[in-house]
Amino acid sequence: MSRYLVTSALPYANGPIHFGHVAGAYLPADVYVRLLRMQGEDVLFVCGADEHGAAITINAEQEGVDYPSYVARWRAEFKRTFDRFGIEFDVWSGTSVCPRHAEFSQEFFRRLAANGYLQKRTTEQLYCVHDAMFLPDRYVLGTCPKCGHAPARGDECPSCGSWLDAAKLREPSCKLCGNAPELRETTHWYLDLPKLRDAHIGTWFAEHEWKSNVRGFIGNMLEDLQPRPITRDMKWGVPVPAEFLEGEEGKVLYVWFDAPIGYVSMTAELCAARGDAEGWRRWWQDPDTRLVHFIGKDNIPFHALVFPSMLWGVQQDYVLPWAVPANEFYNLQGRKFSTSANWTLPLDEFFESYDAEAARFHLIASMPETADSEFTWGDFQSTVNASLADTIGNLATRVLRFIDKHFEGKVPSIDAATCVELDRVLLEECGAIGDPGAHVREFRFRRAAETFVANAAVANVFVDRLAPWALRKTDPERCAAVLNTACEWLALLARWMAPFMPHKAQRLWAMLGQAGPVTAPGWPQPPRPGAWRTLPCGTPLGEVEGLFAKLDDERIAGEVAALEARAQG
RNA sequence: GGCGAGGUAGCUCAGUCGGUUAGAGCACUGGCUUCAUAAGCCAGGUGUCGCGGGUUCGAGUCCCGCCCUCGCUACCA
């Protein structure tokens, strides 16, 4: 048995997260974690908000809010969204409030410096006197030195598309205040990625298996790697350790340097809360740990290259990522999610009207696993109606209501010989049965969802073939045996359902008269004849209710219209 | 510009190391059934596998060229 340390990308505390983030980095991780737990693995699921960086300070100041309050608001907002989706981290924190975050981050910096993986460089950068800050390239506007187009951004000209050096823009101005910035010298530390690549990371990456998007992106980057600055001239962030400053003030670790260290410091926060201050080492410095980073594709360089380089470069026996199941992007009805263009699904309204677990399942079933994908209302309706309500929900009600009416609401009886016969029919003649969990472990979430639905469809075929409504009149014992078998299958479905839709699974479990958590018996082995039944005959069933409500066409059309209306303003 | 991914049925997509008549779901049509949330089951496909070449006994799959779509291009998360 391995130990799994699972992380989801730390959401940046500067704006709302949407379905795309959930589908890409949080929901798959939650499903993965729930499955591993049912399989008896030792798992820790870590996440928190990423709370430093220039964008946060600028927006907080524009709103006239202090930084800690600003990020606290987003931290709470994110948590609310995760709660509504049923995404349950073992620890949820934030890089500005996690107790030992600064300590860990500074320690990484010191160790990397001591091991010769940092370089100090002095460069000239544009400084805005009015805003009292060095300007990130994107905050510089000016005239493109190549094509004369204005305004061009400091990083790229929107007209000719060429890469620009902000310092070479003609007539530069600060995007925030409009004043002309001046060039000032500043000193920063750079992470020596080429050296780390040559020392170990290049080989490590080449010898490990990766998702194709990760291998493609990083493989390409490795060929032309530059040292990367990891400090900034700012107030908000983890201070550069004082002994490095030599009198200079106001330097902090670059947000992308300290953010992933949050995975470590938050693990330590959790362990400390459990009374084991050094317990984090068991997760981070024991080679039996499998470190799994769930992220969107925008985070690939950091999780598959920069952070591993840091982890290795400190020479403290940190484990390196075992898997980086990076997803692509999830769009909304043909366009990118966009807060500014109002192309969004307001979460409050969504959860007032729709079942959170149905949403979970649909996001899993349409996840951008290998290519960008999208949420469309039509697809959502199709998943809810065809897969969840018709195939799965209706299976439960057709079987259980029948039993309520004709078998006193108890699991009907079956004898050993009939078990053998019906096992054969169900398991061998009613369609292909797969293990959704096997696909989840391979990070094939869409296929896992598909397999789960297919497993439910098998039972519909079984019930139709055996036609218990006819048997009831001709052979009541056989009728009971058929319904018994259908109940057993429902119990199996409830367990298979649990990682995807934990509450629905629990309800189905209760409908079958089962006490305790549906997760308690663990993840089911693939059913084999004579080795899968668990229900004692005569168990009283619970109250039968519909698991999933169907969505009608008008309602869906209304949502599409509302989405477009919001975007029109 | 560079890099990457993709272009397969009306729609969404799956197709592993090249190997039978190219598959699934949805939608649609017909039949069966009546336990169930008007649910279920069975049956139904003439698809230039983006275009053009090439390699091969054999190409959706490999190679070359072209067209189209999208994303990324690491300093802004």
Image: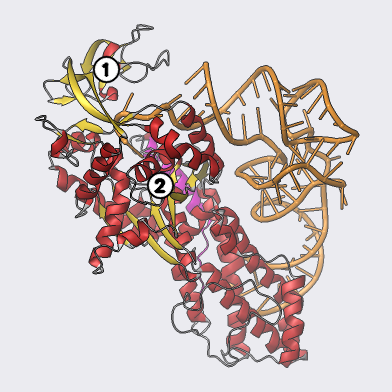
Q: Which amino acid type is shown beneath numbered disc 2?
A: His
- Left or right, A448 with respect to A151, comes to right
Residue located beneath label 2 in the image = A21
Hey, what amino acid is under mark 1?
Leu
Give the number of the disc on residue A495.
none
Q: Residue at x 29, y 17 (%)?
A: A166
Residue A287: quadrant of the picture: bottom left
Magenta stretch: give its range. A545-567
Q: Quadrant of residue A395?
A: bottom right
Report which residue position mark 1 lands on: A141
Mark 2 neighbour density, 10 Å: few (under 14) some (14–19) many (20 or more) = some
Marks 1 and 2, Cα distance to the nearest angstrom? 30 Å
Q: Is residue A565 magenta?
A: yes
Tell which subunit mark 2 falls on: A
Decide whether the magenta segment is chiefly helix, strand or loop: helix
Image vertical order of residue A247 relative to residue A454, above or below: above
For marks 1 and 2, the one nearer the N-term is 2
Relative vertical location of residue A105 with respect to residue A224 in this rendering, above or below: below
Using the rendered image of the protein, determine whether residue A328 is visible from the camera's viewpoint. Answer: no
SS for tag 1?
Answer: strand
In percent of width and height, residue A223 lies at 49, 28
| Residue pictured at 43% horizontal, 46% vertical | A295
Residue A543 appears anywhere in the view: yes
Residue appearing at x 55%, y 69% in the figure: A496
Task: Chain letter for mark 1, please.
Answer: A
